Image (cartoon, grey):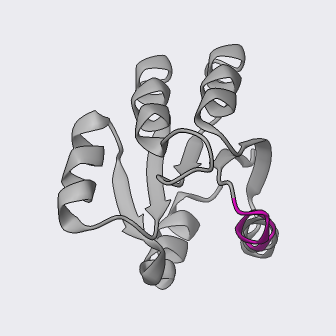
Amino acid sequence: MEVRLFLVEDRLSMQKLLEDVFVALGGFELVGEADTEAEAKLWLLEHPNQWDIAIVDLVLEQGSGMGVVRRARELHLQGKVVVFSAYASPAVARHCLGLGADVVFNKSETGEFLRWLSDQGAH
């Protein structure tokens, strides 16, 4: 069974890049996408337990990924919530972990993020 991914990212170029990465890694299915906080929260509410990993950017065109992290954790205790953001400083990372994120990566740490994601893949 493939690992079901929910992606919250407002930059179309990054969405497409990550979609290509998911295909290249194999074992992943992108089950939902959102580009605003409100859209992401609504998707999470309408799709309870229908995802395995939520990948969340923090700075969105409308709203913040921090609210998405909290909502994802509240609605799906078994799901993994990963923050992948250019704004993930150590202090921001600590805050995100306090909100319920399992792991936080700065976008400058793409290699570490891809290794982590690969480790989560279907075996």
In this rendering, position of residue 66 left or right of residue 30:
left
Q: Main secondary structure of the magenta part?
A: helix
Q: How many numbered badges does the structure rendering display?
A: 0
Q: Residue at x 70, y 20 (%)?
A: 47
Q: Examine the image and state in which quarter residue 88 appears.
A: bottom left
Q: Is residue 72 above or below residue 48?
A: below
From the viewer's side, name the closer residue of 84 and 39. Answer: 39
In this rendering, position of residue 46 left or right of residue 78:
right
Q: Residue at x 53, y 55 (%)?
A: 57
Which portion, as a residue range, is magenta? 11-17
Q: Examine the image and state in which quarter residue 123 appears.
A: bottom right
Q: Is residue 94 above or below residue 33?
A: below
From the viewer's side, name the closer residue of 100 and 39. Answer: 39
**Residue extending furthest front?**
62
In this rendering, position of residue 59 left or right of residue 122:
left
Give the image location of residue 72, x and y in percent.
49, 29
Give the image location of residue 11, x and y in percent.
71, 63
From the viewer's side, name the closer residue of 108 and 35. Answer: 35
From the viewer's side, name the closer residue of 76 and 56. Answer: 56
Q: Residue at x 59, y 39 (%)?
A: 52
Q: Is residue 37 above or below residue 92?
A: above
Reply yes or no: does residue 62 show up in magenta: no
Give the image location of residue 75, x and y in percent.
49, 18
Give the image location of residue 105, x and y in percent.
39, 67
Of the 4 image quadrants, the one containing the N terminus is top right
